[in-house]
Amino acid sequence: MRKTLVVAVREFRAAVHTKTFVISLTLMPVMGSAGLVAALLLKDQADLKDKTFAVVDRTNVLFGGLLRAAGEYNRTQIFEPSETGGDDRRQVKPRFVLERVDVGDGSIDTVHGELSDRVRDGSLSGFVEIAEDVLSTVAADEDGHHPVVYCSNNPMYRDFPDWFRQRVNGAVRAWRIGDAGLAAETVSRVIRYVPVDEQPLYVRAVGGAVHAPKKNDHYISIFAGLGLAALMFLVIFVGAIPLTYSVLEEKMQRSAEVLLGCVTPFQFMMGKILGMVGVSLAIVTIYIVIGFVTASACGYGHTVPRQLINWFLLYQAAAILMFGSLYAAIGAACNDMKDAQNLMAPASLMACIPLFVIRPVMLEPNSTFSTLVSFFPPATPMLMILRQGLPAPIPQWQPIVGLVVVLLTSVACVVFASRVFRIGILMQGKGADAKELLQWAFHGAGHRAKRPERRHAPATIGNTVSD
């Protein structure tokens, strides 16, 4: 155990006593903050050229109202709010220009083709066709034809279709009200929108009094869990993946042969993993302290979930132990960077599993699917932290059982990885593939006899292994 700790301390000091560690520790929040600042600075960097849209109004009654609505939009909605209330407002959105197109005696298919060609050559941004029965039709017909159709070659641009959808419905609704002989004011009062406010559950104080918590507290706890899960994902890659390159570098430079003259392969591998666990905990501790100080300075220090942070540290250490052993085994089994990168892809894919299911887990944290996927060991650390940060409470036994599952899986990974490490650390020549790694993990040293073309060199200085 003492030798393992010596290797761990050496790995920890070698990682943190470098300029690269300090730079990477600083760059991660700086780059994240720079992304937010860039998004804020570039939010108004839009193309301000007028956008022309053709309207095929086959009702012959709606285009006038739409044209007036476009004029109102161009006067009021395309400028940023003015602090002085004057006319010095800066334009931040393009103007909408509506162009009416009559079908006349021609074919509607011909009009469709001509307008589509104009959109392709850039003279139009899109076109809309309003069917003649839109005033009486409220849904698609049996053939799936809708009464209003918008066509464009830029589906990501949503300003005009969202605006037009509201305006054409308003124009149709106004016509129907007038056609029915109803008073517009009466109908407006009847269908007036009723806003619905969202807020957290009421809380009961020590004395029994019930009060509503701050609405911001509801979302801060969500973002805290999401942020900790993202931090764990980041630190797993920052802490575990370098183990592959570290082991591979020592193997290629033959320094591993010197070290194995003093320690066993298991002590060597376990020391490197424990050292990286210490590095990861140092990184997250620094970030958590910075986050807590920032939250306290902004008046939200009371919302930081202390219990969640304790669970996070436990899961973080277990996750590095689990993934670190896999990456260390990969480094020991390979002889060059290319082979290592090929084997690292499946391990990295397992670490990305929580990203694939994060949306359904956040929407329904207590569903059967969310519970089951949270007990899948590679995904358990991040998903369990994420679920604990959501307002909907999860049963208290689940984080405990999840931690036990991750620890047992970590032990199994360490055992299997130690077998691979023991065989592969001194092997030279052709690197092992995924099938051979599994055979080494389950059969141990006894499987070496099936590979006569490779010889396992003794752990002494100067010995080499050749094919």
Image (cartoon, rainbow, N blue to C red):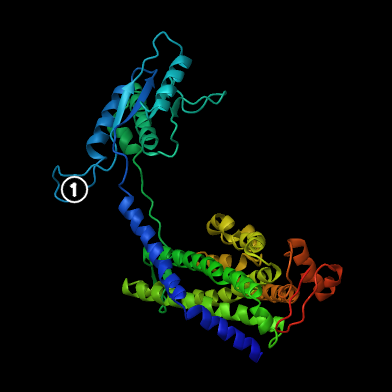
Q: Looking at the image, how many numbered discs can be counted on the residues?
A: 1
- Left or right? Give the position of 372 relative to 237: right
- Left or right? Give the position of 70 relative to 341: left
Q: Amino acid at mark 1?
A: Ser
Front residue of this view, candidates 358 and 251: 251
Rendering quarter of residue 247: bottom right
Where residue 256 sits in the image (x, y, percent)? Answer: 66, 79
Q: Is residue 111 visible?
A: yes
Disc 1 secondary structure class: loop
- Left or right? Give the position of 222 relative to 3: left
Q: Quadrant of the C terminus?
A: bottom right
Front residue of this view, candidates 133 and 204: 133
Residue topped by disc 1: 82
Taking the spot 64% from the left edge, 69% from the top edge, the residue there is: 327
Front residue of this view, candidates 443 and 181: 443
Where residue 421 sits in the image (x, y, percent)? Answer: 71, 75
Where residue 415 sits in the image (x, y, percent)? Answer: 73, 76
Front residue of this view, candidates 359 and 47: 47
Rendering quarter of residue 28: bottom left
Q: Is residue 328 above or below residue 187?
A: below
Q: Is residue 11 above or below residue 52?
A: below
Q: Is residue 134 visible?
A: no
Taking the spot 53% from the left edge, 75% from the top edge, the residue there is: 280
Where residue 83 sits in the image (x, y, percent)? Answer: 17, 51
Q: Residues within 10 Å of mark 1 (few under 14, many from 20)?
A: few
Q: Is residue 19 above or below residue 356?
A: below
Rendering quarter of residue 130: top left
Q: Quadrant of the N terminus?
A: bottom right
Q: Residue extending furthest top?
A: 105
